[in-house]
Amino acid sequence: MLNRWRLFIAVPVPGETRAAMVDWLGSWDARRRGWRPVRAEGIHLTLRFLGDTDPGIVPGLAEALAGVGAASRPAALVGAGWGVFPGPARPRVLWAGLRGDPGPLLDLARRVEEMAVRLGFPRERRPFRAHLTLARARRDRRPGLPGGPDSRAPEFGPVPVREAVLYRSHLEPAGARYEALARAPVGGEGSP
């Protein structure tokens, strides 16, 4: 797979909201309890993972994403609460949830999926589940879960759905680094 780019489409999360998520992870010592937190700059709302892709199709992807963004509606969501995939009996991914009207986000995700299939990507087998990945379980132990009997569900801050971004993921020893290749305003004109 020479000269392939690892791509995905996501909604960016404001810095203050990401900082609140990182602070929350620190407040109950997620690292010590068996989690590998995602770097703050790596927290985003993934709409569609595209995987290893020929970089030659990026201009067409950017143009198609601009059309999807223009045809979609913005949303005002709030990062709140948490959960784990696949479930509490075997937690592997710790995530933050979203509160607010999910309709516009679900519509945007559906349009992104339809666009990806039109461009030749295989249809996603799993249904879209809106979440923000905060940490992954360490391989060497079963991680502990946050909170206790007195703990309240955290509220992290706004997650406005105002643009969809085509990202390239650079896998590095310190963790993934993300490069924005194209931005498509939601409800407006896209700009590669």
Image (tube, helix red, strand yellow):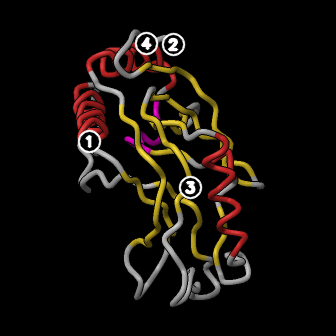
Q: Nearer the viewer, residue 77 or 163?
A: 77
| Sequence order check, earlier mark of 3 and 1 | 1
Residue 26, percent from left and from top: 72, 70
How packed is label 3: few (under 14 Cα within 10 Å), some, or many (20 or more)? many
| Sequence order check, earlier mark of 2 and 1 | 1
Disc 4 marks which residue? 190
- Secondary element at tag 3: strand
Mark 4–mark 2 CB contact (< 8 Å): yes
Disc 1 marks which residue? 106
- Secondary element at tag 4: loop
As drawn, is 50 to the left or to the right of 107? right
As drawn, is 103 to the left or to the right of 27? left
Q: Give the residue type that dot 1 points to.
A: Leu
Mark 2–mark 1 CB contact (< 8 Å): no
Q: Which residues are magenta?
A: 46-53
Residue 99, percent from left and from top: 38, 53
